[in-house]
Image: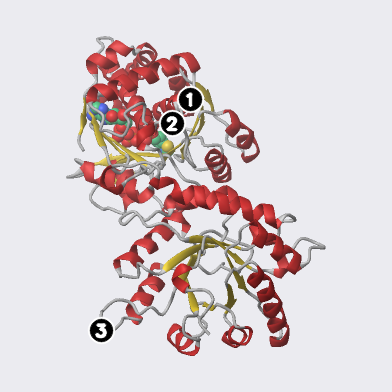
Amino acid sequence: MAPKFKPENIDYSLYLVTGRELLPPGKDYYESLEESLRGGVTVVQVREKNIDSGEFYEIARKTKLLTDAYNVPLIINDRLDICLSVGAAGLHIGQTDLDPRTARNLLPPGSVLGLSIGSLEEASRLLDLYKDEETGGPLKLVDYVGIGAVWRTTSKDVSKKVMLGPEGVGKILDLLHDGSGGSIKSVAIGGIHLPNLPHLLHGSRSPIHLRTLDGIAVISDIVSSPHPEEAARQLSEAFKRGVAEPSLSEGRGGHAVLPTGIHRADRQGDGGRRRSKIDWLEGVVGLMKVVKEKKPLAHQMTNTVVANDSANATLALGGSPIMATHPLDVKDLSKILDALLINFGTISDKQGMIVAGQEANKNLKPIIFDPVAIGATSYRRETAKELLDAWQPTVIKGNAGEIGALAGSLEVASKGVDSVGPGFANPADVVKTLARQKRAIVAMTGVDDYISDGETVLKVSNGHHWMGCITGSGCMTGTAVTVYCGAARIAGTSSTQLVKGDMLLGVLAGILVYTIAGQKAGERDDVRGPGTFRAAFIDEMYHVTTEDVLWMAKFEIVE
Ligand SMILES: Nc1ncnc2c1ncn2[C@@H]1O[C@H](COP(=O)(O)OP(=O)(O)O)[C@@H](O)[C@H]1O
Ligand SMILES: Cc1ncsc1CCOP(=O)(O)O
């Protein structure tokens, strides 16, 4: 008999893995399963650990009656004998289970075979070990891979594993593609819940080939819900919305949606075409008016060295500062803020930063991330990874040393919080590449500031050398960007899954206004050194006019 489900036609979008131990008290397994099927589950995998074969068989058999009724394929975890005896659509194996080649040989033709992948090494082993000798491509041993764990989860002991985060998933998608495993379908698994789904879908889009996931595999979000139908429906809709987003508008080079998730056509009336310098300047002037009228609320979680200067800079620029850090405080704030700055110059409130960022993603608020001195200690590197796994930044801002450390480059050195040396040979390439990798706008400061969303690269050359002589000038660049991204959010007319408004314009405006203020302060006759410069700088932030920007702006569209 021909198999009922052709592996290549299976819809993996909402892949439910069962977990009877997670059911809410009083909820029957079959009742929960049927409700979740009604809600839109597209594949069911029965996963049972430590039970007798007879009981496993009975559960699988009865589960199949339900999945058949909803025309959904049933996959059995690990146990080939159960898979064969109930006539399931396929088998899912882990790295320590049956070898894929053996499993494939024993499965009836046309069966589905899935494999768990937890690292780039495991993905490349799949591609290397199972090469088709004739074509050199991977043998179609495996129909899909389950990539994870994305995040920590209570549904499986993953304590010894490295969490991939959305970025790690994206790297695996690129590797599979490069190794011609492009036709292997992929679902992500581990710690996926409705609130972090936009981050997963945005952050896992592969940086080189722009590949997206075919689905998400979920246990607890559905199984432990008292209303699994509703839980499944929400996940299914959120997946379809999130994964489809990039195709909603067209851009150059296949970058339909910029890394921040901003639709090209939404950018202040540019209708998808490239903006000229005048277009950009008009946009900046427009945002200066928004700042003046609306006073964007800039929530800043920053370091103890510059907190006071940053709050004063916010006021001088026309915004409204609030500097809360406690996890219980930041949640409510997220609903009213216009933009969030997370600067980890003196990390003491990591948990607050995690919660604030997650809430900002949920509330479509821009996050400006400043990984101060990230190259200086391993604690900073680990914290940056933890934060970026917890939420999707809109903007990453740093000096050349910090951006280099984040990009894994040794070309530019740092000394504590400062960058040393002449900078990158090709800064435009550095910001563009990192923007694609991190799926965020990257702003790299220095004598010249480079900004990229992974496609466009802008260079701003305003500023003054006194700016490099006071502490906090980089941190306050982050403040200015936060105020202006807040204004861009207020002015934005449409939103994507993670942010509302034209963020690239917000970053450009923040940097231009701020560096023009620095330049005006530095050129003043009464400024005799860093102390007088610091006071004059705040004054000039207050006094920058739209005319100053139109006359003084020194910027280039590099790409
Ligand atoms: N020599 C300089 N000339 C012009 N602008 C500068 C100079 N040094 C720093 N800036 C400006 O000061 C701000 C902070 O940059 P930077 O010194 O790179 O940050 P950090 O303090 O994080 O090292 C940026 O907006 C940058 O444009
Ligand atoms: C000195 C110092 N130490 C920890 S944060 C900080 C301020 C960094 O300021 P910036 O990078 O903006 O110059």
Which disc is residue 134 wearing? Answer: 3
Please name the amino acid that badge 3 sits on: Glu
Look at the numbered disc 1 and give the secondary structure of its residue: helix
Residue at point 49%, 77% (across, down):
112
Do callouts 2 and 3 mark residues in contact (Cβ within 8 Å)? no
**Dot 1, how many residues are within 10 Å of its Cα: few (below 14), some (14-19), or many (20+)?**
many
Residue appearing at x 33%, y 11% in the figure:
545
Q: Residue 501 has which mark? A: 2
**Quadrant for ligand 1?**
top left
* Helix, strand or loop for disc 3: loop
The residue depicted at 39 percent of the width and 20 percent of the height is 287
Q: Is residue 397 above or below residue 218?
A: above
- Seen from the viewer's position, the closer of residues 76 and 511 is 76
Q: Position of residue 232 (x, y in %)?
A: 63, 56
Image position, residue 258 (x, y; %): 36, 42
Q: Which residue is mark 1?
A: 490
Question: Which label's residue is closer to the chain start, 1 or 2?
Answer: 1
Amino acid found under the numbered disc labelled 2: Gly
**In the image: residue 551, left or right of residue 168:** left
Q: Residues within 10 Å of mark 2 (few under 14, many from 20)?
A: many
Residue 527 seen in this snapshot:
no
Outermost residue to the right = 26
Q: Residue furthest front?
A: 1
Q: Nearer the viewer, residue 259 or 1?
A: 1
* x and y, in percent, of residue 23 in the image: 74, 64
